[in-house]
Image (cartoon, rainbow, N blue to C red):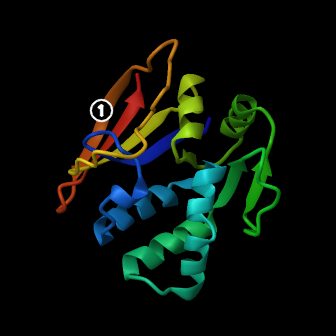
Amino acid sequence: MRNLIFDINITLDGCCDHTKAIADGEMHEYFTALLRGADLLVFGRKTYELMVPFWPDVAKSQSMTKAENEFARAFDSINKIVFSRSLESVEDRKTRIVRTNLGDEILKLKQQPGKNILVGGVSLPSQLIALGLVDEYRFVVHPIIAGEGRRLLEGLSLQQSPRLKLAESKTFKSGVVALRCVKT
């Protein structure tokens, strides 16, 4: 069975606004390695529209740093699913829109052969956490106090909190700490 991995950048005060994160070469290398262990990306509409067409365009133009260009190529090479009721179409050839039940669809995807499934964003992962479908968490904690912005898992009410175990941690030169937690 494939693992569903939730990965997110957060500040010390729980803000998950991507503009508050440190985006250096070391961070892009970390996320590129994460992408290489997956063959499917799952997003809600908002996160999808933050990522596409930006990263596929960078993959084509190779217009950024070496680490960002490599991330863009890895991102562009992976199939994507966007859960949305309002998005009418996508231009990205590797993306499909899904309008069916989130939980049922993710259960089907997890049972298919393949590599890991990565899920990003805030709202969609919160729903998957509430359904108990996330197997692994990758919290990339930035040494910043944002003081404003959307908070991680804001408003999430869980019937049962997932029990997690720290499986790995990595500290970057910037002071960012990547935590890998798995369900126990």
For residue 24, above or below residue 3:
below
Q: Position of residue 74 (x, y in %)?
A: 53, 68
Q: At x 78% / y 44%, what residue is drawn? A: 85
Q: Position of residue 183 (x, y in %)?
A: 43, 26
- The amino acid on which the numbered mark 1 sits, given as a three-letter code, is Leu
Residue situated in front as seen by the camera: 121 or 96? 121
Mark 1 neighbour class, 10 Å CA radius: few under 14, some 14 to 19, many 20 or more: some
Q: Quadrant of residue 91?
A: bottom right
Q: Position of residue 105 (x, y in %)?
A: 74, 36
Q: Quadrant of the N terminus?
A: top right
Q: How many marks?
A: 1
For residue 157, above or below residue 125:
above
For residue 64, above or below residue 77:
below
Q: Is residue 3 visible?
A: no
Name the side, left or right, on which 95 lies relative to 181. right
Q: At x 33% / y 39%, what residue is drawn? A: 14
Q: Position of residue 116 (x, y in %)?
A: 56, 46
Q: Quadrant of the C terminus?
A: top left
Residue to which mark 1 is pinned: 166
Name the side, left or right, on which 182 lies relative to 117. left
Q: Quadrant of residue 66?
A: bottom left
